[in-house]
Image (cartoon, coloured by chain):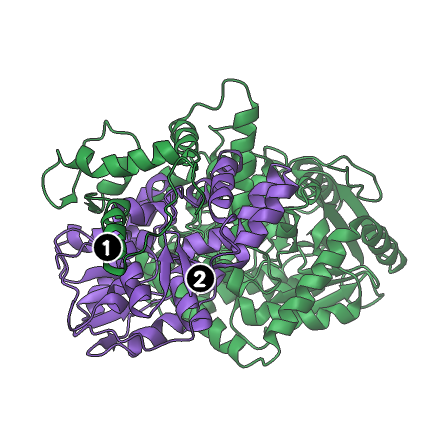
């Protein structure tokens, strides 16, 4: 595999730093069990995802050229991954020409240091934040808190998560796992001036958040705000932030200093390309024709908006994703979260089970590639298996990322690594599939095994196989939850009989291929 | 036509009546069925679990079995959407992973003649009314690989609607995965169980006597859950319905996907 050069500064591909919030403490199967056992969480998720899913479907249905738009979005994203170094250089010069300052951060630590230094130099004790995945991923709030700077999330859902000292569980709707009653409790516990007569009506809760935040917006002299960006236009140096609430726009326009932390894959080549993505993103994401607020900002303008603009371009494992030709299209993601809402796994387990800032199907291919899969005890090694490969995610992806194919590719990488590591290819599954592979490539042995399955299992009573003792490998995973048909006579034994009857009936003999291959059919 | 039957390993062992029904159906339609006993498995369990290297000899065995007869058979049929999908989409990937370009080419030739059952009937044999009789209510689960990878679309439903005596009922949330997913059902058994629990509940909600699909794997999963919970509906493969006639009607046995008459 070739080394991908990322322009200025040139870097070697490297994985995300361990301090990133891209890896949980437990593997997916264990983490999922907790969520599956929580009926409130299950119901919150089911309701919210099915509502967004339905909205999305109708918003997409009304676009006649939706498939063409997806193709265009995919083609543009491939153009970006194919020409990332040049585009990054172009972006740097256009941002600089517009009066902005570009910083390069190769990992979470560097990005954290850059932002912290910028904020401290400006004497900020509090900073406002626009909802951003990149800053979540690098744990920026915690880094700033460590430096004595308080972060205030301005996005309603992000604020709920922050006030509850919780972590987001969805890309678009970070507090999707919470219901109205829970949100009311959180607000009452953390907003001292809030009247206790507040109900759990969404409008009342939103009003409470609005009042809480307005004070912050208006009371920040010498202020600093931090954002991400949905798109960064290489041609013009323009950053684009799309949102629903307008709080983002307050953060992007009111403060003196604006710092945007943006993943290097967020580039689009030209301003015109936004036409494609601004149609794809809102319909896929919130199920709206257009999102209420789209803020575009290019460098600085005297007397208009922030006086200083800093762009922190973040690698943090993206170069490692880019290095794998079969996995790199995970970087095409525009964070719409449509794949989460349709995923039968995500809908039941929620986002926390994935252990990463990026949950759901896209997270299952993005997180392990960004961090690398370091071995069988790495929780992120379990993520590529956290899917039944049903393909619903691929159908809805606005930029046509073939998530099921990449999931299988990552499973292959995980298995290949074990096979190539001496003494590491002896897990239960490794042994079982090695054995099965041998049997299934030996027609004669296989024929015998198939014919013996019925007689061998005839010792078990009943017509089906029920719960089995846990000492058996693999099978209880099935029989703990469902019955298994008990094998009887195999099809091939019936076929032998059928052949005989058929040839005696029409007086001909069909040449019959023996399982050992001595005869040709 | 001369049609080569690839039963799939799961059918051969766990649901032999599905292969038997496929033979009965195709012969009734006037076609000649051949069954090469050297056949084993398509390798899907290996490929989808990431074991490409271990899948390679299985794929090779598959190609060795079916390639020599390509000139003498008109089609290869598999009563499984996911196995047909594996042959079509993954055999070449496995060959490429092993750097075996010869196998890649041979696999492509075999896959070009391989069809899932409803594809064979509707597209190749150009038939939707197969003369079947099945006086029961059914609900159709479109299995993910049939629906999204092979894109069989309305073919199975067209075949079902032409069956004499049948009543096809709507399955709520039909396009949601049943939670089988091959080794997923065991590796992530709790999540898989949550999925199949919902699927089985929707089958019950449909009010149908049978849930029908084109994949034995999904049917074993749904049927196994229905049985475990004591629910009345049974799972049945499309081939079993299409093979059923007034003279020789399908009567289910106690065994999941089994037939007593």
Per the image, label 1 sits on a secondary structure element best described as helix
Chain letter for mark 2 = A
Looking at the colours in the rendered structure, which chain would you say is drawn in purple?
B
In the figure, is residue A165 to the left or right of A289? left
Chain letter for mark 1 = A
Quarter of the rendering containing residue A271: bottom right
Vertical placement of A366 versus B154: above or below?
Answer: above
Contact (CB < 8 A) between labels 1 and 2?
A: no
- Asked whether A92 or B210 is in front, the reply is B210
Residue at horizontal 49 percent and vertical 38 percent from the top: B55
Q: Which residue is mark 2?
A: A342
Q: Position of residue A430 (x, y in %)?
A: 43, 29
Question: Can residue A267 be spotted in the picture?
Answer: no
What colour has chain A? green
Q: Which residue is mark 1?
A: A504
Residue at horizontal 65 percent and vertical 52 percent from the top: A329
Q: CA distance from mark 1 to mark 2?
A: 55 Å
Quarter of the rendering containing residue A97: bottom right
Q: Position of residue B251 (x, y in %)?
A: 13, 62
Q: Nearer the viewer, mark 1 or mark 2?
A: 1
Count of numbered marks:
2
Q: Position of residue A440 (x, y in %)?
A: 41, 36
Vertical placement of B72 versus A428: above or below?
Answer: below
- Asked whether A370 or B126 is in front, the reply is B126
Residue at horizontal 17 percent and vertical 64 percent from the top: B250
In the figure, is residue A489 to the left or right of A299? left
């Amino acid at each position: 595999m070739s080394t991908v050069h990322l322009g200025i500064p040139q870097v070697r591909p490297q994985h995300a730093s361990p301090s990133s919030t891209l890896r949980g403490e437990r593997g997916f199967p264990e983490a999922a069990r907790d969520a599956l056992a929580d009926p409130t969480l299950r119901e919150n998720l089911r309701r919210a995802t099915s509502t967004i899913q339905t909205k999305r479907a109708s918003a997409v249905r009304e676009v006649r050229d939706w498939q063409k738009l997806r193709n265009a979005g995919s083609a543009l994203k491939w153009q970006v991954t194919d020409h990332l170094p040049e585009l990054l250089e172009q972006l740097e010069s256009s941002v600089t020409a517009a009066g902005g300052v570009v910083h390069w951060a190769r990992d979470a630590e560097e990005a954290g240091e850059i932002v912290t230094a910028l904020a401290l130099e400006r004497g900020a004790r509090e900073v406002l934040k626009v909802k951003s995945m990149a800053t979540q991923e690098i744990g920026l709030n915690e880094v700033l808190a460590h430096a004595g700077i308080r972060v205030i999330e301005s996005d309603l859902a992000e604020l709920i998560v922050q006030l509850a000292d919780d972590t987001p569980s969805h890309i678009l709707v970070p507090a999707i796992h919470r219901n109205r009653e829970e949100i009311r409790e959180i607000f009452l516990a953390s907003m001292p001036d809030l009247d206790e007569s507040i109900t759990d009506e969404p409008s009342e809760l939103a009003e409470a958040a609005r009042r809480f935040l307005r004070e912050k917006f208006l009371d920040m002299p010498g202020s600093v705000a931090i954002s991400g960006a949905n798109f960064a236009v290489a041609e013009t140096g323009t950053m684009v932030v799309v949102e629903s609430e307008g709080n983002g726009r307050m953060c992007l326009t009111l403060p003196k200093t604006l710092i945007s932390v943006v993943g290097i894959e967020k580039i689009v080549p030209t301003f015109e390309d936004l036409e494609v993505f601004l149609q794809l993103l809102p319909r896929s994401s919130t199920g709206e024709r257009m999102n209420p607020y789209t803020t575009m900002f290019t460098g600085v303008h005297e007397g208009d908006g922030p006086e200083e603009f800093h762009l922190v371009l973040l690698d943090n494992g993206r170069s490692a994703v880019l290095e794998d030709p079969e996995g790199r299209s995970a970087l095409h993601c525009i964070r719409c979260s449509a794949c989460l809402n349709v995923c039968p796994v995500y809908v039941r387990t929620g986002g926390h089970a994935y252990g990463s800032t990026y949950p759901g199907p896209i997270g299952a291919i993005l997180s392990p590639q960004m961090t690398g899969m370091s071995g069988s005890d790495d929780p992120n090694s379990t993520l590529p298996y956290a899917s039944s490969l049903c393909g619903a995610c691929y159908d809805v992806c606005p930029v046509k990322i073939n998530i099921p194919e990449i999931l299988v590719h990552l499973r292959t990488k995980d298995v290949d690594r074990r096979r190539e590591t001496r003494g590491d290819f002896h897990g239960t599954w490794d042994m079982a599939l090695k054995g099965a592979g041998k049997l299934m490539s030996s027609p004669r042995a296989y024929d015998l095994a198939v014919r013996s399955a019925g007689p061998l299992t005839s010792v078990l009573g009943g017509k089906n196989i029920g719960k089995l003792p846990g000492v058996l490998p693999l099978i209880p995973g099935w029989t703990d939850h469902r019955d298994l048909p008990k094998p009887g006579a195999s099809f091939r034994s019936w076929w032998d009989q059928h052949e005989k009857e058929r040839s005696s009936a029409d007086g001909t003999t069909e040449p019959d291929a023996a399982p050992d291959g001595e005869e040709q059919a | 036509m001369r049609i080569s039957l690839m039963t799939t390993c799961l059918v051969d062992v766990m649901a032999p009546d599905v292969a038997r029904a496929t033979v009965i159906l195709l012969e009734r339609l006037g076609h000649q069925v051949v069954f090469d006993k050297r056949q084993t498995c398509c390798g899907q369990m290996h490929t989808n679990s990431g074991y490409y290297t271990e899948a390679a000899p299985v794929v090779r065995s598959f190609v060795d079995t079916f390639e020599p007869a390509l000139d003498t058979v008109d089609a290869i049929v598999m009563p499984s959407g996911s196995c047909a999908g594996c042959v079509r989409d993954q055999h070449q990937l496995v060959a490429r992973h092993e750097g075996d370009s010869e196998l890649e080419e041979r696999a492509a030739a075999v896959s070009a003649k391989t069809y899932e059952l409803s594809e064979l009937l509707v597209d190749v044999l150009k038939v939707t009314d197969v003369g079947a009789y099945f006086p029961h209510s059914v609900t159709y689960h479109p299995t993910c690989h049939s629906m999204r990878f092979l894109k069989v679309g309305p073919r199975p439903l067209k075949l079902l609607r032409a069956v004499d005596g049948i009543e096809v009922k709507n399955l709520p949330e039909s396009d949601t995965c049943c939670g089988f997913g091959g080794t997923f059902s065991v590796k992530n058994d709790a999540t898989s169980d949550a999925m199949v629990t919902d699927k089985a509940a929707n089958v019950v909600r449909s009010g149908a006597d049978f849930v029908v699909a084109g994949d034995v794997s999904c049917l074993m999963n749904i049927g196994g859950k229905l049985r475990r919970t004591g629910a009345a509906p049974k799972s049945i493969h499309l081939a079993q319905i299409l093979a059923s006639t007034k003279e020789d009607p399908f009567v289910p046995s106690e065994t999941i996907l089994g037939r007593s008459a």
